[in-house]
Image (tube, rainbow, N blue to C red):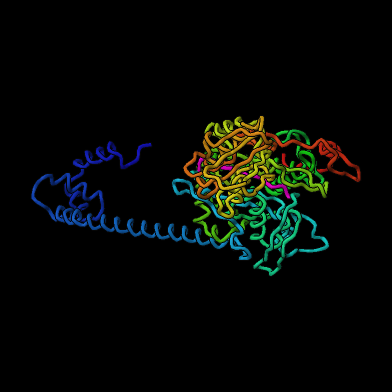
């Protein structure tokens, strides 16, 4: 249908105007309205101005004023809109800041309890964040989700850090590593004091996750002491936080390679891929009896699959470009997190998210700290020798992947320099400088880079002008690996008659953990391949990975021990966690 204001209809109306009698036109001209003006124009043509024509002139002169009023109204409206929008943005920003809860990174007990980062040659520094998942039932919602409050009620304190991951973002933001530390790891917890509750400890040997009972700063200090990795920030999440975050992103896709029913975490899924939301997501990341060998190791592998899927969803088109989705995610995240004061603002969290978003999924590596059975307790574990290589790789900011997403060329080249992992290479370091502490400094540099803790120190028989690394029969490749890590050229290597490796520090080594002017592996561990050996490493772009359901009798149903798949088949009355 043609609008009456369109050209053809308007012209047709004007052509009919001359047929109107002049008297009627004059009468109409005295009557306000468009019809009268049109008739008067038709009758008078271009002759002398009539009263009507004068009115038309005045009408034309008034139109700019009306235009100015319209323009002024539009400007005022736009200004008001901008003010409202800015006000909403400011309210949103303040609202999110108000959601955040932050506490100090350290408790002041030790001056360097979290460690300090070293800048690269461009002045850039990496970022290491300790991510903690607390099992504390400190709210009614956590009690409902986690259970265990029927007798105790809502609990106080921080609980245990049943999930611990060190997130490392490289100084050049080209790669990242996420290393899980199993909660059953036995280590030394240093002297700590919870500044919020006042509870303190003089230090003890126990499970790594127990340090959170003395506050997040104590957990930070414990992980730094265990790994040697500087911790710049921490992020703590509880049960309800996992539920809120998974709901905010619309669910997370995860796959299981068989039917599974973990009667402890209540996760029940059929074989295949599912979208996990809310409680189902919490059941998945909490399940330890459903995956692997039923220990905490299997749980870390499943968590990596979940987080990889979440990262892919964050990076996918539409997730971070939808304002409503971003609001839900930001609101849920800030309500769910406890962070250190260094991350205690939305601006800083956005900056962190931006840094992580720069890293492609194929260059984000997930790994689990290598473990060995605790000789004093078969239900506990201790770091395996290979874990020192993984720690050193992260501490020295070396990528575990190349730009292709495959094992880095540097890692392969360094690994082939010696058939023996760096963690198995011990060096006798002797001080020939006459300056106290030189042997200890170099030996410490070696162990920091993943070499064996069996490395020893002592004094050389006499003063030495030059530095030498002497190796026994069949040890040349190992000596080359040590020399590469310390920046020693081949001219410093000598074959001797004694077994093993002996490094004599001469007066030409003026200080530091690397030889002055030498070419080193950029401060990286001598054997990067060893860093991922038995670490169950996988990159975040591995979209087809499925969590391995345990084949052991790790669960119990009606008092009968079963595998998780047998329990799934038997629990016909139990609804699946997700379709």
Work out which residue is located at the far right of the displayed protein and give it. 559
Give the percent coordinates (x, y) of residue 358: 50, 42
Q: Quadrant of the C terminus?
A: top right
Q: Number of labelled discs? A: 0
Residue 469 placement: quadrant: top right
Q: Is residue 309 left or right of residue 258?
A: left
Question: As rendered, which of 366 and 147 lies closer to the eye?
Answer: 366
| Residue depicted at 12% across the width and 53% down the height | 50
Q: Is residue 153 left or right of residue 357?
A: right
Q: Give the extent of the magenta segment.
A: 173-183
Question: As rendered, which of 302 and 7 lies closer to the eye?
Answer: 302
Work out which residue is located at the far bottom of the displayed protein and give it. 198
| Residue depicted at 79% across the width and 60% down the height | 149
Give the percent coordinates (x, y) of residue 33: 26, 53
Q: Is residue 144 found inside the magenta-colored segment of the image?
A: no
| Residue depicted at 62% across the width and 63% down the height | 110
Work out which residue is located at the far left of the displayed protein and give it. 48
Q: Is residue 181 found inside the magenta-colored segment of the image?
A: yes
Residue 105 placement: quadrant: bottom right
Question: As rendered, which of 450 and 493 lies closer to the eye?
Answer: 493
Q: Quadrant of the N terminus?
A: top left
Residue 305 shows up from this direction? no
| Residue depicted at 23% across the width and 39% down the height | 16
Give the percent coordinates (x, y) of residue 165: 65, 48
Residue 365 placement: quadrant: top right
Give the percent coordinates (x, y) of residue 516: 49, 44
Residue 315 shows up from this direction? yes
């Amino acid at each position: 249908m043609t609008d009456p204001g369109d050209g053809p209809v308007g012209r047709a109306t004007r052509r009919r105007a001359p047929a109107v009698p002049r008297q009627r036109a004059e009468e109409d001209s005295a009557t306000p309205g468009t019809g009268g003006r049109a008739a008067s124009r038709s009758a008078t043509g271009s002759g002398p101005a009539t009263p009507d024509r004068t009115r038309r002139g005045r009408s034309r002169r008034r139109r700019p004023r009306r235009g100015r009023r319209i323009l002024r109204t539009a400007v005022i409206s736009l200004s008001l809109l901008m003010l409202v929008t800015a006000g909403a943005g400011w309210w949103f920003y303040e609202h999110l800041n108000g959601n955040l809860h932050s506490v100090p990174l350290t408790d002041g007990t030790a001056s360097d309890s979290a460690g300090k980062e070293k800048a690269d040659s461009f002045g850039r520094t990496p970022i290491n964040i300790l991510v903690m998942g607390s099992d504390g039932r400190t709210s009614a919602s956590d009690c409902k989700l986690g259970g265990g409050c029927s007798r105790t009620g809502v609990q106080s304190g921080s609980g245990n850090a049943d999930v611990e991951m060190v997130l490392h973002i490289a100084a050049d933001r080209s790669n990242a590593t996420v290393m899980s530390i199993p909660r059953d790891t036995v280590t030394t917890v240093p002297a700590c004091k919870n500044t919020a509750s006042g509870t303190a400890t003089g230090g003890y040997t126990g499970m790594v996750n127990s340090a959170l009972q003395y506050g997040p700063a104590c957990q930070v200090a414990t992980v730094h002491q265990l790994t040697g990795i500087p911790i710049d920030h921490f992020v703590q999440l509880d049960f309800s936080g996992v539920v809120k975050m998974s709901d905010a992103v619309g669910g997370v896709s995860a796959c299981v390679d068989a039917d599974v029913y973990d009667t402890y975490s209540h996760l029940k899924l059929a074989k295949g891929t599912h979208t996990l939301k809310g409680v189902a997501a919490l059941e998945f990341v909490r399940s330890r009896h459903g995956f692997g060998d039923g220990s905490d190791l299997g749980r870390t592998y499943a968590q990596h699959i979940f987080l990889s899927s979440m990262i892919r969803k964050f990076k996918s088109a539409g997730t971070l470009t939808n304002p409503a989705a971003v609001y839900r995610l930001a609101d849920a995240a800030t309500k769910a997190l406890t962070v250190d004061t260094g991350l205690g603002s939305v601006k800083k969290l956005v900056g962190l998210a931006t840094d992580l978003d720069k890293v492609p999924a194929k260059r984000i590596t997930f790994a689990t700290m290598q473990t060995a059975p605790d000789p004093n307790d078969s239900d506990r574990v201790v770091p395996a020798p290979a874990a020192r290589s993984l720690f050193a790789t992260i501490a020295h900011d070396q990528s575990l992947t190349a730009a292709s997403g495959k094992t880095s060329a540097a890692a392969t080249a360094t690994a082939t320099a010696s058939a023996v992992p760096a963690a198995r290479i011990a060096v006798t370091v002797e001080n020939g400088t006459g300056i106290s502490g030189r042997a200890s400094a170099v030996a410490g540099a070696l162990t920091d880079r993943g070499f064996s803790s069996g490395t020893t120190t002592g004094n050389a028989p006499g003063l030495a002008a030059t530095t030498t690394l002497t190796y026994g029969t069949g040890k040349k490749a190992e000596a080359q690996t040590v020399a590469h890590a310390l920046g020693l050229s081949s001219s410093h290597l000598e074959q001797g008659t004694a077994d093993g490796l002996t490094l004599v520090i001469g007066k030409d080594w003026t200080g530091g953990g690397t030889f002055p002017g030498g070419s080193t592996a950029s401060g990286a561990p001598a054997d990067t391949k060893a860093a991922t050996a038995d670490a169950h490493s996988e990159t975040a772009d591995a979209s087809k990975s499925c969590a391995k359901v345990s084949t052991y009798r790790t669960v119990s149903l009606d008092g009968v021990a079963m595998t998780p798949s047998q329990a799934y088949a038997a629990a016909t009355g139990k609804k699946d966690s997700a379709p």
